[in-house]
């Protein structure tokens, strides 16, 4: 079944619509690369910082007048490495507090939480 589809795809690549199809596949794989890049560190950190700035910054960003002192004690987005002062338990609780985020952002936050905890465990060995 899969083979048939592959053969048909190869055949169609020689046609005009096949070339368009190739373009679609290229775009799809580039999109995949962007996701893969995000999955690997820097880009994920930046994406999560943006999400948390937007959704949590009103209380957790010490540069805003609306910042809440109790919230800043947990984390302050003015810090470059804003999770550094948090306990493992608090880092885990990011997921709970992020429940109202849209699913894609919740997934990013959850991956970020896993990364932070993994790297702490790795460096404490
Ligand atoms: C309206 C202000 C406000 C917003 C917005 C806000 N927080 Fe907080 N947050 C607080 C305050 C105040 C505390 C400390 C008291 C408490 O635990 O509720 C806190 C505590 C926390 C804690 C520690 C919880 C614990 O039990 O130790 C985490 C984690 C946290 N916030 C994450 C988030 C995340 C993630 C967002 C955005 C999705 C967010 N907060 C948005 C005010 C806020």
Image (cartoon, helix red, strand yellow):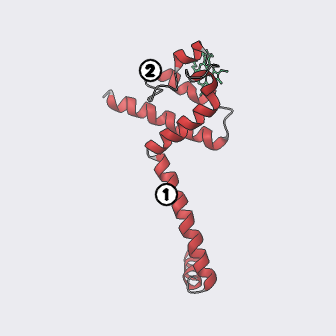
Tell me: residue 69, above or below residue 39.
above
| Residue at 44% over, 46% down | 40
Tell me: residue 85, above or below residue 55.
above
Of 70 and 40, the residue lying toward us: 70
| Residue at 58% over, 13% down | 70
Q: Report the disc number at residue 86.
A: none
Q: Where does the N terminus fall, quadrant-wise?
A: bottom right
Q: Tell me residue 61's x, y (percent).
A: 56, 24
Q: Tell me residue 22's x, y (percent).
A: 56, 75
Name the residue carrying label 2.
85
Q: Name the quadrant where ligand 1 sits.
A: top right
Tell me: residue 100, above or below residue 61.
below
> In the visual, does 67 lie left or right of 39?
right
Tell me: residue 121, above or below residue 8.
above
Q: Residues within 10 Å of mark 1 (few under 14, many from 20)?
A: few
**Residue 84 lies in quadrant:** top left
Dot 2 lies on which element? loop
Of 97 and 16, the residue lying toward us: 16
Res 34 visible: yes
| Residue at 59% over, 70% down | 24
CA gap, disc 2 and disc 1: 32 Å
Q: Tell me residue 13's x, y (percent).
A: 56, 82
How many tags in the picture? 2
**Residue 103 lies in quadrant:** top right
Q: Residues within 10 Å of mark 2 (few under 14, many from 20)?
A: some
Of callouts 2 and 1, the N-terminal one: 1
Q: Report the disc number at residue 33.
A: 1
> In the visual, does 46 lie left or right of 1?
left
């Amino acid at each position: 079944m899969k083979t048939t589809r592959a053969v048909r795809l190869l055949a169609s690549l020689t046609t005009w619509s096949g070339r368009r199809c190739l373009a679609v596949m290229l775009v799809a794989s580039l999109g995949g690369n962007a996701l893969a890049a995000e999955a690997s560190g820097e880009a994920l950190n930046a994406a999560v910082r943006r999400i948390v700035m937007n959704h949590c910054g009103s209380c957790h960003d010490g540069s805003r007048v609306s910042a809440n002192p109790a919230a800043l004690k947990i984390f302050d987005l003015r810090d470059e490495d804003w999770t550094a002062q948090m306990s493992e338990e608090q880092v885990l609780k990011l997921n709970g507090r992020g429940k109202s985020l849209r699913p894609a952002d919740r997934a990013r936050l959850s991956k970020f939480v896993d990364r932070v905890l993994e790297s702490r465990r790795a460096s404490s060995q």
